[in-house]
Image (tube, helix red, strand yellow):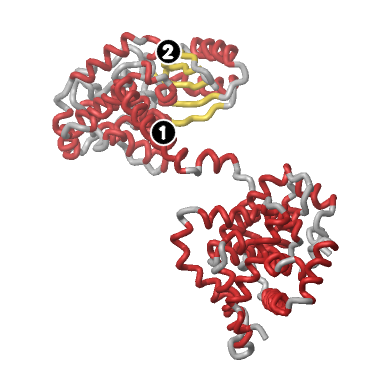
Amino acid sequence: MREAEAGDAPRFLDRLRAGEASAFEELVTTYQHRVFGVALRMLGNAAEAQDVAQEAFLRAHRALGEFRGDAKLSTWLYAITSRLCLNRLASGERRLVRQGEETLLRLADDRRRPDAALERSELESALARAIAELPEERRIVVVLRDIEGLAYEEIAQALDLELGTVRSRLHRARADLKDKLERFLP
Amino acid sequence: MTCDDARESLSALLDEALTPDERRAVESHLEGCPECRRELEGLRETVALLHRVSPAHAPAGFVDRVVAAAQPTPWYRRVFFPLWAKLPVEATAVVMVALLAVYTFQRTPALQQAARYEAPAPSGRAETPAPLGDVRKEQEATPALRGAPPLALGARSAERGRDATVARESKRPTESAPAAAPPPVASPSPAVRAPAPPSVPAPATPAPPPAQSGEAPATARGDAPPMAKTEAPAAKSAAPAENVAGPARPETDARRQALDRAGGASRVAPTVPGVAAKRAPPSADVVARVAVKDRDAAERELASLIARVDGRQTQRRREDDATVVEALIPQSRYAEFSRALADIGPWRVEAERPDLPSQVHVILRLE
C-alpha cells in the first residue's frame, strides 16, 4: 500500500513537508482522480476541471509546510479544490464556459460502450445533468458526500460550515435529485 | 415531530448521522407517517443512484504536468525568461552596444581614419598626401612608438599609390619596385638595396620587424594606428616576405616564391588596402627569432657579437616579451655572425634575402 493511500502516515507527511518531490508525486498520483472528479462534477467542463485540479495541487504544494495535520490530508485537498471551484463558479469568467457544461454529460457516455450499457449510460447522463443543475452550495455537498464519500464532519471541515448546515444542504440536494431522477426510481 | 421536521432529518437518518435521540424521534414519526416513509424510500433510492455514478478519471499525463509545474523555477529562467524582464534587458543591451560603438568610433580617430581610407575611390588615393603628413607627425610626436609607424606608413603609401602605379608596374618586366612606387611614399624603408628611389623620404630609423609593429599600442597614436592596429597581426606573419623586395630572380623554393609574391605586391602596390598593410616591407635582409633564457644577458652578448663582427646596432627596443634588435652586419662577416649567434640561443630565420647586400640589415627578436 502506498504511503499516500495510508492517508496521513506521519512519515509521509514529514516527507511532504520536507518538500520531497517523490512524496508530492505520490500525493498527486493518489488523489488526482478524486480532486479532478470534484472539479469536474462542480464545473462540468473537463478542461476547466483539469486546470482547477492542477491549481489545487500546486496550492497544496506551496502550503504543505503549513499543513498542521488537524484535518486529514484528503479533507485538506478537498477543501482547497472546493474553494477553487466555488470561487471560479462565482467569478465572471465562469459565465463564458457555462455553455461547455454539456461535457459533464458526455463524460458519462465516454466511459462505456453504448451497446453494452445503454440504460446505465442514460442514467449517468441524467444523474450528471441533475447534479449540474443543483445550486452550487448544495452541489458541492452532495458531490463530497454521495460521490466522494466524505463524512459530514469532513464536509463541514472542508467547506467551513456548521454540521447542521451540511445536513440541511445535503437533504435539500438529495430531495432535488429525487424529483429530477424520479423516472429512474423503482 | 411534524413531517417537515422529520423530512429534514431523513437524509441524515440514511447516513446514520443522527444522535440517538434524534434518531428515535424520527423513527417514531415514520412509524405513523406513510408519506414520510415513501419520502425516505425515495431518498434511499436516490442516494443509491448517486453511488452508481462512475468515478471520474484525471486525464493521462496529469501527474507529470502537475509535478513539472510544481518544480521550482531555475534562477536563470526567473531572470531571463519572463517577458517582462527579458525585453527591457535586451533592449537596454542593444542600446548600450549601439552607444558604445558610436562612442568608440568617435573617440578613436584611428577608426575614422580607417573608414576614410576605405571610402574614396581608388584613383583618388594617390593624390591625397594629407594622411601621410599626419602619420609622420604622429610618429615624431610619439618616440616610444616610433617603431611601428613605418609599417603603417609604408602600407598606406603603397595603398594610396597602388592604383596609380599598378598600371605602370604591370607593364614593367623588371622589378625596380621602389622606383616605380609613387614618391614620396614609394619606399618607406631606409634599407633599400635594389635601385634606390631618388626621393625616398625614408625615416632615419630602420623599419621595425613585423612583430614589432604588430605589438605596438596602436591606439595611442592618432592616424597611424588604424593600419597597425587592424592589420598588424597579419603583418607579423606576412612581413618577412617583404624583405625580398629586391631584384627578381628565378626562385624554386616555395618560401621564396611566397616572399617574392609578397614583395612584388608591395612593389607594384597592392590592389587591396588590407593587403598593402600586411605586406608592408620592414626592409630587412634577415629576420630571425632567437630563443634566449636571459634577455639582458642575451642583449649584452648580442651587442658584443655585433661589435666583434664590425657590425652596427641601429636600434634596440624592449617589448613585454621580447627585445628587438636591428643591426647592420658586413656581408663578409655575416657567416661568422650567424654562427656565433647560435651561442646566444637557438635561432630561427623567418625571412632572408637570397642575395645579401654588403651591409646586411638584420632584425633579431630575442624572446
Q: Which residue position is annotated with label 1?
A: B93
Q: In this rendering, does residue B208 appear at all?
A: yes
Q: Which percent across, then down, holds residue A24?
A: 72, 53
Task: Report the residue at 23% width, 24% height from top.
Answer: B186
**Disc 1 secondary structure class:** helix
Task: Report the residue at 50% width, 72% height from top.
Answer: A102
Q: What residue type is labelled 2?
A: Gln
Q: In this view, does B280 lie to the left or right of B339?
A: left
Q: Looking at the picture, tell me which residue is in the foreground, B208 or B253.
A: B208
Mark 2 or 1: the one toward you:
1
Residue B315 disc label: 2
Mark closer to the chain start, 2 or 1: 1
Q: Looking at the picture, tell me which residue is in the foreground, A156 or B201.
A: A156
Q: In this rendering, does residue B353 appear at all?
A: no
Q: Looking at the picture, tell me which residue is in the foreground, B73 or A30.
A: A30
Task: Report the residue at 56% width, 58% height from top.
Answer: A51
Quarter-wise, where is residue B195 in the image? top left
